[in-house]
Amino acid sequence: MSCHRRSLVSAYLDGELSQQETYIFQRHLKECQECSQVHREFQRLGISLKERRVEDLPLGFFERLEARIELEREAAAPWQRLELTARRLVPAFVFLLLVAGLISFFPGSFSRTGPEALAEVFAESGESELLFSNYSGEYS
Amino acid sequence: MNPGMDEERKLAELAREGDRSAFEELVARYGKRIFHMAHSMLGDRAGAEDICQEIWTKVYFSLNKFKGKSRFYTWLYRLAVNACLDELRRRKRTAAISLEDLGIKHQPETQDPNAFERIERLEMSQIAWKLLVKLPADLKATMICREIDGFGYKQIAQIMKCRVGTVRSRLFRAREQLRENFRTYIEEGRE
């Protein structure tokens, strides 16, 4: 008959027992040959699996992937193509909406153009005289 | 959020917006590990490449579904494991063990309870992997998540969409089965 605590070996190996359970199980391992052997063998199997070399991707994998994605994109239904295109355009569209929103929020700022408008903007900084002198030839 | 996760999330966002180099970077970072998992699940290299092409294509067209709540790699891995499980269901492989299936040169053993200790490391690695490939799909996937990719029980539960208790019991059953199959393999090699 196998030890009734044998089913805990796996969770103990993975560090998934509570602190108290771990302490009790560690003591048990010192006394139980069966659990101790099972623990060693589980450990050894795990190490063996980890030691297997991780292979490189096959040559040309990404190029084939790109070609496949392109084929699927072409084969996609029109609404799906639209969705893919929209994903790229949405950020630009949102930016344009924000700018348009700001413009409409401040209507007075853009009602006049030319030197008068510029003078208003720079009046506080005392630069309006300089600006008028630059534009006087054009607007006189 | 740690810097690694942040960078991963930014790459995923750029790839979602159509940045080719960002998508290529994601494939470069995780492609090998996903391929290794797929090869361990399916047991053949050609099948693993096919399924990886399918996985990454699905990733490309599903990037808008990645919300950044979990790590990108966990999201990717879940997608990849499910693709492999679907493929295994299609293939309907069984978990039968036979020496002919394994095709590895082995040393004959006498009746020896210490079979594990007598096998050379490299040979054991090959045998363990071949036996892993033969496990039932759900046990195999759980073992790969834990022993090869080092996920914790909670992460495995998220990936496999099951409870932590199920992960715990599957790992125990998988290890018991591997251990038993290993002994069977060694015993059948006896002259």
Image (cartoon, coloured by chain):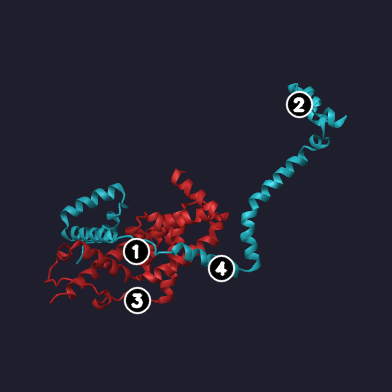
Chain colours: A cyan, B red
| x, y percent for residue B165 | 37, 59
CA distance for labels 4 and 2? 57 Å
Going by the numbered disc 2, the residue's amino acid type is: Phe
Q: Which mark is residue A52?
A: none
Dot in front, 4 or 2: 2
CA distance for labels 1 and 3? 17 Å
Q: Quadrant of the C terminus of chain A?
A: top right
Going by the numbered disc 1, the residue's amino acid type is: Arg
Q: How many marks?
A: 4
Q: Chain of mark 3?
A: B
Dot in front, 1 or 2: 2
Per the image, the residue denoted by label 4 is A72
The mark nearer the N terminus, 4 or 2, is: 4
- Is the residue B157 above or below the residue B133 in the image? above
> Foreground: A70 or B169?
A70
* Residue in view at x 55 percent, y 68 percent: A71
CA distance for labels 3 and 4? 33 Å
Name of the residue lying farthest toward the front? A137
Q: Quadrant of the N terminus of chain A?
A: bottom left
Going by the numbered disc 4, the residue's amino acid type is: Glu
CA distance for labels 3 and 2? 82 Å
Could you classify mark 4 by the number of other residues whose Cα lies within 10 Å: few (under 14), some (14-19), or many (20 or more)?
few
Secondary structure beneath dot 4 equals helix
Per the image, the residue denoted by label 3 is B94
Marks 4 and 2: CB-CB under 8 Å?
no
Query: Same subunit under labels 1 and 2?
Result: no
Per the image, the residue denoted by label 1 is B170
Per the image, the residue denoted by label 2 is A122
